[in-house]
Image (spheres, rainbow, N blue to C red):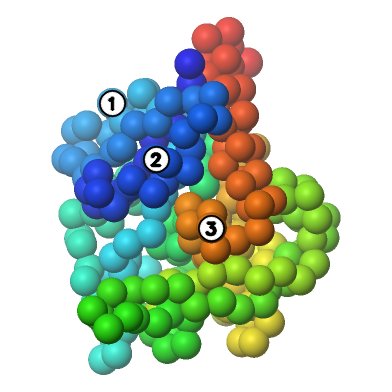
Amino acid sequence: MASVGILASNRNEAQKYVEAIANRGVDSLVLEPRSLSHMSEAINTSDALIFTGGADIGPNNYGEDKSEYGSFDIQEYRDKWEIAVMRAALDMDMPVLGICRGMQLLNVVSGGKLIQDIPDHFDKNDEDQWKSTFHQIYISPGSKLAAILGSGGFVKVNSQHHQGLKESQKASALLASAYSLSDGIIEALESPRHDWVVGVQWHNELSHELYRTFGNLFQALAERADQFAEKRLTGP
């Protein structure tokens, strides 16, 4: 059976993603940050990867200094680990899904930058815990994302991030396939150079906050993992 590796800071953080991939015909494996000597082990035990949400990516990884209001809770060990794993996965043309931080990581690894603070794409509850806000986005018809979800056009998504990117920060190697209508923040990326590499800014693992069709992202990733596993066994 194919296996989807889920990269997160810890198992508790990964739990919602584990639940989202369950019952889709593949196994899941949580990949917490480790030394780079374990990178080949992570790659060789996975047939697709999910890069999850979480801490800000250190701006040193895209050639900038920390701004006064941006980039907090940086986990340098996680950045180093996930950047190396993503580069290896892209070199292998392994299926990759980036969610929130994961989409931002895809952009950074591909040569792009980030806006370090976007004040109105998140909220917090009375216990100072992050909670979702909601806004309209536009998904480009004809994009890989639109094909996965079944249609393009206007749709409402959730949001729990204070960093992101616009066209001026986007890596030239990537295509933007969705935008926030209110401010032009890019909501989805895909790589035309790879078979199946997709990033979304919203939290797709919170299925109760999204339309049912958004579950197609996890199903499509599982199917690609199966194909990648078979290719490994049989060769190109």
Label whose residue precedes the other's in the sequence (2 or 3)? 2
Residue type highlighted by circle 1: Glu
Label whose residue precedes the other's in the sequence (1 or 2)? 2
> Which element carries disc 2, helix, strand or loop?
helix
Percent x, y for residue 145?
70, 53
Q: Which residue is mark 3?
A: 208
Q: Is residue 177 visible?
A: yes
Relative to residue 37, is residue 90 drawn left or right? Answer: right
Which mark's residue is nearer the viewer, 2 or 3? 3
**Number of residues whose C-alpha sits closer than 10 Å to that of mark 2, classed few (under 14), some (14–19) or many (20 or more):** many
Percent x, y for residue 193?
64, 45
Disc 2 + disc 3, Cβ < 8 Å:
no
Residue type highlighted by circle 3: His
Vertical order, 115 against 225 (above or below): below
The quarter holding residue 35 reads: top left
Please give the name of the residue rendered at 45% of the width and 73% of the height, measured from the top-left corner: 132
Which mark's residue is nearer the viewer, 1 or 2? 2
**Number of residues whose C-alpha sits closer than 10 Å to that of mark 1, classed few (under 14), some (14–19) or many (20 or more):** few
Could you give the CA–CA distance between mark 1 and mark 2, rounded to whole angstroms? 20 Å
Label whose residue precedes the other's in the sequence (1 or 3)? 1
**Number of residues whose C-alpha sits closer than 10 Å to that of mark 3, classed few (under 14), some (14–19) or many (20 or more):** few
Residue type highlighted by circle 2: Val
Give the label on residue 41, or none. 1
Q: Quadrant of the C terminus?
A: top right
Relative to residue 35, is residue 102 drawn left or right? Answer: right
Residue furthest bottom as drawn? 68
